[in-house]
Image (cartoon, rainbow, N blue to C red):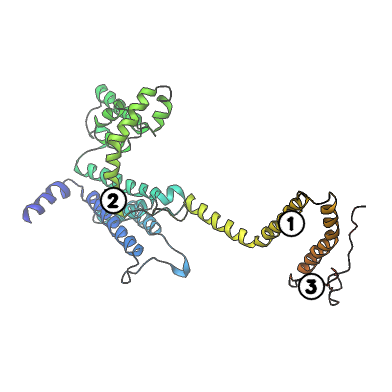
Amino acid sequence: MTTLLDSYREHIVNAHKQPLFLLLVGFITSFVFIRFSVRMIRAQVRWWPGNVTPGGLHIHHMVFGLGFLLLGGIGVFATYGGQPWMDWFGLAFGIGCGLVLDEFALILHLDDVYWSEQGRKSVDAVIIGILFTSLLLVGYVPLGVVPGEETRWGLVTIISVNCLASVVTLFKGKVWTGLLGIMVPGLSWIGAIRLARPSSPWARWRYTERPRRRARALRRERLLHRRADRARTWLFDLIAGAPDKVPANHPAAHRVAERMSARATAHLDAHAARALARRQARLADRRSAAATPGRPAGTADQDAAAAGPTRSRQAQQRRRTIRAGRSRAVAVTPTGLETRPARHPRLRPHTRRIGR
């Protein structure tokens, strides 16, 4: 313990890195705590407090993170960076970073995608932030520049080439290699030389007219990158929890809802479908009767003409009864004329002229 404290004083306190160290501690602590909290809420554990919902409004922890960021940033300027305020405000700023970046995907998509595949961008942002802060703490600075050294043309050339290589690496779809290459010169050069990922902008621009190179990129994606993606997915599931298979706002959920709505509409239109089936059956009976051999040529037409007025009056009576809000049952007299109730004055007798 004594050796550990001596190392802390030598490498952190004496090197004036204690505010940055406390910022990193607050960053990691807030991220671990909030991920533990949301996983307990997702598991519906009874002893955990749950979401903050005053008045039914769900307040995301990003809101609290913004408060910590404002407290840390404004506090440093207000106290002119003096001790011990600098340490405390650095800790508050780190807590705010962890809470805000944990919902980075919500800010990016302007939608609650916390437990979906898009929500993995939040974990990427948190890991990149922790990694950069750690590199700054151990002595690395962006682009390899050491403060106080005399600027030389060789150093400027190396920095420029490194920046160009990092940009090319990012366009090739290698996010981690490109970002780490900013801090560690030479790493992005390897990423810029190697093949791009098939789904990257570089592949769409450069590999469209080069089928062999695109085939090599696809083969490498299947062999290497998918294994790395599976390991990365397993690690992220361990850290942040597995995402939902079909989130609430996924297009598949919309398709299921549309199918359910279509089934409900079809159920409501069942009466119309049955009426159409009855009409088709009657038409088929007429055609079969007309095609029956041994009957006189005009028999089917005479039967249809005789049954036509009665069926027409029955159909009209059904329509009028439905409009009046009564039952669809129709009483037919032996003579073929329907009974019309007197309490509905709108149901007037109606005759239809049959063809001459």
Residue nearest the viewer, comparing 335 with 28: 335
| Label 1 CA crowd tier, 10 Å (few <14, some 14–19, many 20+) | few
* Quarter of the image that includes the N terminus: bottom left
Q: CA distance from mark 3 to mark 1?
A: 20 Å
- Give the x, y percent position of residue 96: 34, 55
Mark 2 — residue? 81
Q: Which residue occupies the extreme bottom position in the image? A: 343
User: Residue at (83%, 59%) from the top-left corner?
Assistant: 308
Q: Quadrant of residue 155?
A: top left
Counting residues from the start of the chain, the first of labels 3 and 1 encountered is 1
Inspect the image, locate mark 2, and give the three-letter code of the amino acid beneath it.
Gly
- Res. 30 visible in picture: yes
Position of 60 relative to 287 (above/below): below
Q: Mark 1 belongs to which amino acid?
A: Arg
Which residue in the rendered view is the most extreme toward the right?
Answer: 356
Tell me residue 254's x, y (percent).
Answer: 51, 53
State yes or no: discs 3 and 1 in contact (Cβ < 8 Å): no
- Residue linked to disc 3: 331
| Amino acid of disc 3 | Ala
**Mark 3 or 1: the one toward you:** 1
Q: Nearer the viewer, mark 1 or mark 2?
A: 1
Quarter of the rendering containing residue 186: top left
Q: Residue at x 35, y 27 (%)?
A: 215
